[in-house]
Amino acid sequence: MLMKAVGQKQLSMQKSVPAIPLTRKSLWKRIVENKALYLFLLPSVVYLLIFHYIPMYGIQIAFQNFNPALGFSKSPWVGLQHFEDFVSGYYFWTTLRNTLTISFYSLLTFPIPIILALMLNEVQNYKYKKFVQTVLYAPHFISTVVLIGMVTIILSPSTGIVNHFLAMLGFERQYFMIQPKAFKHIYVWSGVWQGSGWSAIIYLAALSAVDPELHEAATIDGASRLQRIRYINIPTIRPTIIILLIMKIGSMVSIGYEKAYLLQNDLNLEMSEIISTYVYRRGLLNASYSFSTAVSLFNSAINIILLVIANFVARKVSETSLF
Amino acid sequence: MAKSKLIKESKGDRIFNGVNLAFVTLFLLMVLYPLIYILSCSFSDPHLVANGEVWLYPRGFNLEGYQRVFEDSDIMIGYANTIFYTVVGTLINLLLTLPAGYALSKKFPGRNIIMTIFFITMYFGGGMIPTYLLIRDMELYNTRLVLLLMGAVGVYNVIIARTFFANTPKDLEEAAIIDGASTLRTFVQVVIPISKALIGVLTLYYAVGHWNSYFNAMIYLRDDWKKPLQLFLRNILISEELSSAMSDMANDSEAMAEAERLKQLLKYSVIIVSSLPLLITYPFLQKYFDKGVLIGSIKG
């Protein structure tokens, strides 16, 4: 996530500066001169064409009744039937509601890494700051399976520490993992635990670009620490915040199925089935290839619309935008 | 350090420092506690763990959990597979990403077209089902190759590499080219040796991805002996939780209770054993991702 935004932004900036070759050589000569560079790129481009572009071509099955035996070209076309089936089906509202709930809930936690970075930036003991950073990054390196495993252990009704604590205080033990209502909280806050430190890196890096002279001048003028954070640090990292926010909104609906799938069980499915896990369940477990590709395409379309809207609003409001 | 500051701190600033430090420490403890808890449980007597008597430091010191992990053939097979996928997969990643990033940091005809080919994949893809059908048509289903090839090029990582190469001093490279070295030779013998920070960061990113992923393996692999560690972890940590919780409620026989005890025992140590390699590696590379490479990509 971090690098996405930054790289993208930077690239679009470079693109706007046209390269002016000092000496104009013939196109063919320039291609021959650079043949090694084309060879350098060849494996990656071939990889992308096969593993990314061929599947894009395969999206056409969303508009077919795809039959593997017949292939893409001979499978019958059905137009938008699968989309209609999905939208009028029982799972449409359930999965859409669950997806949007998780998305907006996650979006609310967006400021946490920013606040964390601003606070860390004010820690004056260098060694302590390094130590805190090292600890906060650690959960990022834990796999999703282990993360959910830890959550399961800690929330276990019979042996989990949370329930021992509840029991000690005289409350009833709760089986959180099968409670539909607990799903969104578990999903979002385990993500905060795992990702906040790592997400703060990019803001910390941006904060290290603040000119120290600004702080000195402000201090001489009598600005307090809070004022300096508000009027110097936050404005400095504002473009970074906006870019990351656009990215976040753009990928809001494409919630990682990896984690949601691990948190699902038969009992919490009414709240935990999101569009992407529904695609997996219908597509691969039930082999409804065409239908689930249509559902997945619907999801991508929402994503792209959100991304474009977020980008448009950001450009109007702040003159910072992704593209 | 506060003392070395030219201007003396006001009282308000000292209060600010105290409050800030308190919040940072609170955050630290919230992140640290679950890790310490699991670690302590892994060294404790499983009965004491189950009864909630372990909450901070190990009690009834016990290494049986670790012993069981290393005796478990599934876990060991998974571990070996994961090491294989991580090492070979990351090598493939680097062999594709580094030259691509280097090439894209240069100017040549058609660069923007190739760049666009890379970019589109960041925002749009075929999705799960068309990819699955492709893998099946290519007869890669249930082969080890599928885990090595999928995600062979991370476009974000190519951008990181490109930015890094674009910002490294060109003197050595130019000297090599004037001396008549080919592009390939310049890249291998001159550019690569001065790109340790980049290689470190990319290796970390890719290796973490391989080590921790489970979904592709779950979809594409059928044979148990090809499966990576994460799938076995999933069986131990998650899938059986429901059944074990239900058996808790039933009247357990002595043997079932014993089996349950061993699984409870395995849980904590297997988390530690599977996560440790990454957790002890990244602090050594931390200096690179705090500054160096990321900063480069921000400033452009």
Image (cartoon, rainbow, N blue to C red):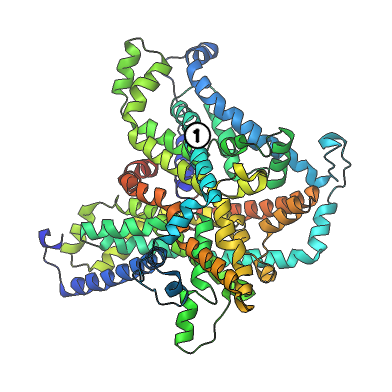
Position of the N terminus of chain B by quadrant = bottom left
> What residue lies at 35% left-to-right and 20% top-to-bottom?
B189
Position of the C terminus of chain B by quadrant = top left
In the picture shown, does residue B38 fall above or below A21?
A: below
In the picture shown, does residue B251 fall above or below A39?
A: below
Camera-nearest residue between B14 and A321: B14
Label 1 sits on residue: B88
Kind of element beneath mark 1 = helix
Percent x, y of residue B131: 69, 41
Percent x, y of residue B161: 43, 35
Percent x, y of residue B68: 47, 57
Camera-nearest residue between B80 and A251: B80
> What residue lies at 33% left-to-right and 62% top-to-bottom?
A118
Q: How many other residues sit within 10 Å of disc 1, few (<14), some (14-19) or many (≥20)?
A: some
Percent x, y of residue B63: 39, 60
Any part of residue A243 in sight: no
